[in-house]
């Protein structure tokens, strides 16, 4: 039986690892320095632009993940959203994409 782990899936998993490392490194540093996330995210008009932009992208990602998970028969997609709250979407989205790639390979979808 051929492995479902493709080069593209491996690439997504590496990116997910980078997202996890940055979240687990930078978030504790911010908390240790007493940073206020909401104040930083929504402090000035430029912060609002960047923050709302990222929130809209995150919403699009959530919709994409739900649609793709249903289309491919991937179960428990809600776990990625739960993990996003604990880690970061920079980790969970590429993680989802890696498992999506493996699922597509197992179904032989290009």
Image: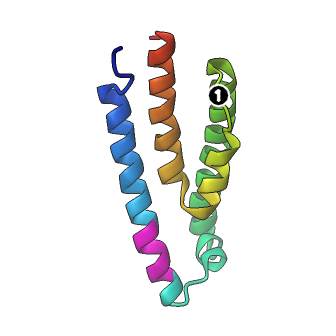
Question: Is 45 in front, or is 97?
Answer: 97
Residue at the front extreme, as displayed: 1
Q: Is residue 46 above or below residue 102?
A: below
Does the segment drawn in magenta span residue 25?
A: yes
**Residue carrying label 1:** 69
Instruction: Judge left or right: residue 2 versus residue 83.
Output: left
Q: Is residue 99 above or below residue 72?
A: below
Q: Residue at x 60, y 52 (%)?
A: 53
Residue at the left extreme, as displayed: 7
Q: Quadrant of the C terminus?
A: top left
For numbered disc 1, what is the local secondary structure?
Answer: helix
Q: Quadrant of the N terminus?
A: top left
Does the segment drawn in magenta span residue 13?
A: no
The x and y percentages for residue 95 are 48, 42
| Few, some or many residues within 10 Å of mark 1 (<14, 14–19, 20+) | some
Q: Residue at x 65, y 22 (%)?
A: 73
The x and y percentages for residue 60 are 65, 38
Q: Residue at x 62, y 74 (%)?
A: 44
Question: Is 1 in front, or is 65?
Answer: 1
**Main secondary structure found in the magenta portion:** helix
Q: Residue at x 63, y 76 (%)?
A: 43
Say how the picture is coloured: rainbow
The x and y percentages for residue 55 are 65, 53
Residue span colored magenta: 24-30
């Amino acid at each position: 039986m051929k492995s479902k782990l493709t080069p593209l899936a491996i690439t997504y998993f590496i990116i997910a690892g980078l997202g996890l490392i940055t979240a687990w490194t930078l978030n504790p540093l911010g908390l240790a320095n007493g940073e206020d996330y909401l104040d930083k995210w929504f402090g000035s008009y430029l912060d609002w632009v960047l923050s709302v932009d990222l929130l809209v992208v995150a919403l699009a990602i959530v919709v994409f993940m739900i649609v793709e998970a249903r289309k491919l028969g991937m179960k428990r997609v809600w776990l990625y959203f739960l993990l996003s709250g604990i880690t970061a979407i920079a980790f969970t989205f590429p993680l989802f994409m890696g498992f999506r790639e493996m699922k597509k390979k197992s179904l032989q979808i290009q």
